[in-house]
Amino acid sequence: MGSGKGRPTPSRAEREAARKRPLVADTKEAKARAKAELAAAREKARIGMANGEDRYLPARDKGPQRKFARDFVDAGWHLGEAVMPMMLLVIVLTFIPIAAVTYWSFIGLWIFILFVIGDMIITSIRVKKVAKDRFGTRMEKGLGWYAAMRTIQMRFMRLPKPQVKRGAKV
């Protein structure tokens, strides 16, 4: 009859060696898998933010009033979208070796910037007025500034991406 376990009792050193393992798996496959999962999560968050999904937006962009301000700005045409192209034009004009062309291009740029600032102020006032009518007296702080800053971004560079077409009724 086979009594006993049929093998020698392991030594204490053998048992301790068998129990030891790294706290965090340090295999190449685990690292590659974790990196791929993180990249997939970031891509999902980037797409969600671009599409305006509320849970992926940063705190400054969350909420129905901010969404309204974005849609209000995106539905219209604003001078601020042309600031960068206008500055590039002025840079090109400064290469013309005629002092009058350089001078008047800078004067024109500053006049344009004043019109852009006026457009930003008007947009800010209009957004706050319409939002107050739509959402009541409880207004988010900085809503007008948020809308004004969005007007000076070129439409294709805005994040979250515009959700309404130009000319749409908001």
Image (spheres, rainbow, N blue to C red):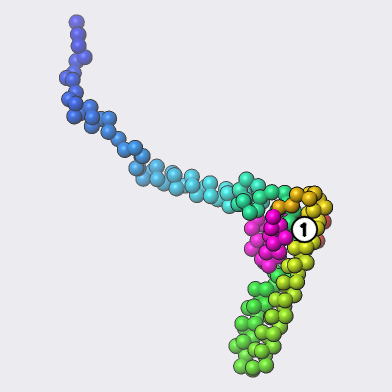
Q: Is residue 170 left or right of residue 88?
A: right
Residue 64 position within the rendered picture, expressed as x and y whole percent measured from the top left: 72, 49
* Whole-percent x, y for residue 71 in the image: 74, 56
Q: Residue furthest top?
A: 1
- Magenta residue span: 141-165
Closer to us: 143 or 33: 143
Q: Is residue 57 visible?
A: yes
Q: Can residue 156 be seen from the camera position used here?
A: no
Residue at point 44% right, 44% down?
34
- The answer to whether 101 is drawn above or below residue 26 in the figure is below
Position of the N terminus by quadrant:
top left
Q: Position of residue 4 (x, y in %)?
A: 20, 11
Q: How many numbered marks does the figure carry?
A: 1
The residue at 21%/14% (across/down) is 5
Q: Residue at x 60, y 52 (%)?
A: 58
Quarter of the rendering occupied by the C terminus: bottom right
Q: Quadrant of residue 142?
A: bottom right
Q: Residues within 10 Å of mark 1 (few under 14, many from 20)?
A: many
Helix, strand or loop at disc 1? helix
Q: What is the three-letter code of the residue carrying label 1?
A: Lys
Is 22 colored magenta in this rendering?
no
**Which residue lies under the disc numbered 1?**
128
Is 61 on the left or on the right of 22, as rendered?
right
Q: Does the stretch in magenta take in 155?
A: yes
